Each structure stands twice: as C-alpha cells, then as structure tokens.
Amino acid sequence: MSLSISKVTQFSWKKSLILGGVSIAALLVATGLPKALVASDHDDGEVDTKGRNLNLTDLYAYREKDQNPNARDGDLILTMNSNPRSIARQQYFFSTNARYEFKLTRVADKEATPTGQEDITLRFEFGAPNDRNQQQIKFTAIKDGKEVSATNLRTTALNEKAYINRLESKNGKIAVFAGLREDPFFFDVEQFFRVRAGALSTGPGVGFRAPDQAADSFKGYNVNAIAIRIPQEFLAGTTGTNVYDIWETISLRDGNGKYQQVERLARPAINEGLITSNSLLNAFNSVPPTADLSPAAAPIATEAIRTLKALGNNDNRTKALLGAFLPDVMRIDTTGNSGYGNALNGKGSPIRGRMIKDDVIDITLSVLTDGKVKGDNVSYEGSNLAQGHKALEGNFPYLALPN
C-alpha cells in the first residue's frame, strides 16, 4: 500500500494495532459517565469538555457514479459531517486533539451478519489553523496490518474555492476535502421529539406538522465536512469484496496521549431515535459496534425496545427491527445503485449506503412504525419558507457551499 501527494509528502509505514473500544459496562456505572463523555449527536447538546467539532451529525456513503454520471466507475464517496448548527458565515475548525475516522468491514455478501470488525480505517488528524485559517491534515490509511500516512494536505478556508487534496496509490487516485459546507440533513426534529414524547407518555400525543407548516430544523446551518473519494480497488485489495459495513468515529486524546472514542455514528436517526436517555446515548457513542448486542449493553437494548414498542411494534416485530438495525453500521452493496431506501437484505436492513439527498427520515419513520407514520413532511428542496437547502455542487465533494 502506498500513497503520495507530492515530493514533500512524508510517509510513515508501520504495523497497525487497532485498539478496541472501552468497556460499555464501565460506562454504565451507577455514578454515571465521565464528564468528558457527556454529549451526543446532531442536536443532543454539548458540554464544555466536548464542543461541537467533536459531535458527529451524519455519514454518507455512495458510488460516485450515482451522484455524477460523468464520474469514474468504481469510486466511492464517504462523507463525515460534524460540528452541528454552525451559523452563517462563521468559521469553525476541526479539533487538533482528535482523530476523525471512517471504519470499514469487508463483508462476504449483503446477507452477512455485521461483525464490527475494523478491516480498514481511514484516519484524519488536523493541525492548528494558520494565518489563512487553513489546517494541515494528516491522512492515514490502515488496512491489512499496515498503515501509511500522507501529510501536507490542507483544509479549505472559509470563502475559498474547495481545495481538493489529490493522492496517488497503486490502487488508484484518492481525493480528500475538508472544510465548512452547508448541512444537507433535513428533518423536523423539534416536532419529532414531541411525537416521541407522546408515544412514550411523557408528553401530549401529537403528530407531525402539515407540509405547509413543517419546519426543517437544519435549514441555514453549516457543518464541518470530511469527504474522501476512494477507489473500491483500494478498499478491497486482493479480496474482491464489493460489500462493506461502514461507521465513523471521533476519538479524543487524553492527558496521557491515549485516544478514547467519544462519538460514533452510522445509520441516520437510529441511536437518537431509539435511545432517549443522554447517559445511554453517550455510552452508545463510546463503544464499537461489536458491543451493541452484548450483555453489557443490555440497558441500551432495553431502552430501544421500549421506544419501538411505544411506536406500535409487537414483540416479534421489535425483535426483527433490533436485528435489522443493530449492530449500528451502514452497509453498502456496491453492485447496485446507491440510495438508503433502494434495497434491503433478508433482515430488513438497508444495504445501499446513503446519498446526500436521500429522505432517510421518511424511510426510517415508515420502517420503525410499520408504515403508520409516512414521514415528517420535510424535503431537501423544501415545500415552504421554513425548508430548503442550496443546490448541490456538480463535482466532488458535492456538498452545497456554506451559508
């Protein structure tokens, strides 16, 4: 495995040891979570020890050809968004004390049970902003027991044209973008929490607002985006794999120089939708997918079951839904067109990744309620003045320009 970006690029090769997550049982002690772990995804809040640039919002994974018909066959786009609710024209930076990572499992076929095995890690680390508000990026790819790093990559500063970092590998060309972009997520999340509270008997029973009243809670906001275009040949190596399980994490360096995972995200709206207790959300964020169905994670599963039953699911359907959505990974079968609702496997789990404009909330609500709730009446383009996003860019990284 080799990478290069220029003559001044620095390389580092060494055997890679992928460390497992911390014990979830240790996080669920009666005294609660360590303060540094108290925060969650998108709109679940933050604390002084964990700012917004350490909060993940969304994961996107799709064949580039499905977004751009002129793109090369065989390239995948992975996009990690963080730093929710960034306001118009405001510059935020990626944490200089964290690792932002895509993690992938090579999967035998679309029906295989997720393992959460870390076959490939794509890691991004950021330096301090310079006088032009750019950050240097160190990109490290870890696979097949080896790791290789490339430095001298940089972020795109506010108000600048997208800077695309281009790398060469023996398995094809890689492109990396990191910078502020419009948050593409669309969801009437405020009304969703009211609907969920009513279902759980902790608030009055209400439904979603009509299309002319529904409001997109993310209209006008930005996120920090990391996007990578990567050849499937690079990911598959000699295995011939064409199905992957993907998730993303952020790990924070402690005072001893060790990294502890503080965020994890894969499928949209699963952890936030099914888990209501902040302490359990943070425990969920702090462990690998391998722990999702373990005995130590029983409190998390119990709360998810409670939510699913409150949404009208019987015991058998609840069990089936847990099997479909946990462990929480995003599967992409690259043999078919990308799209969150394009195909399911035998367990009812989405298997075609996620494209930027996919209405994942409508899809998820319909599945979790067995069709009783069709959606939140919010779309990417919008049907009233409280909705609507900018047009996507025509080329990589495709995300719309920031507000």
Image: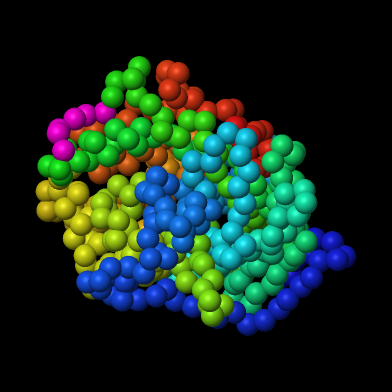
- Foreground residue, 169 or 380? 380
Q: Position of residue 61 (x, y in %)?
A: 52, 49
Q: Position of residue 230 (x, y in %)?
A: 65, 55
Q: Is residue 165 left or right of residue 82?
A: right
- Foreground residue, 213 or 96? 96
Looking at the picture, the colour scheme in use is rainbow
Q: Position of residue 384 (x, y in %)?
A: 42, 18
Residue 38 appears in the figure: yes
- For the N terminus, the image quarter is bottom right
- Residue shown at 31%/71% (left/top)? 27
- For the C terminus, the image quarter is top right
- Foreground residue, 350 or 366? 366
Is 214 drawn above or below residue 365 in the view shown? above
Residue 171 appears in the figure: no
Instruction: Give the residues in magenta.
Output: 203-208
Q: Residue furthest right?
A: 7
Q: Is residue 359 left or right of residue 175?
A: left
Location of residue 304 (image quadrant): bottom left
Q: Is residue 3 left or right of residue 353?
A: right
Is 137 drawn above or below residue 348 in the view shown? below
Is 403 a magenta residue? no
- Residue shown at 78%/51% (left/top)? 131
Q: Position of residue 367 (x, y in %)?
A: 27, 42
- Residue shown at 32%/41% (left/top)? 364
Most common SS among magenta residues: loop
- Residue shown at 65%/50% (left/top)? 178
Location of residue 378 (image quadrant): top left
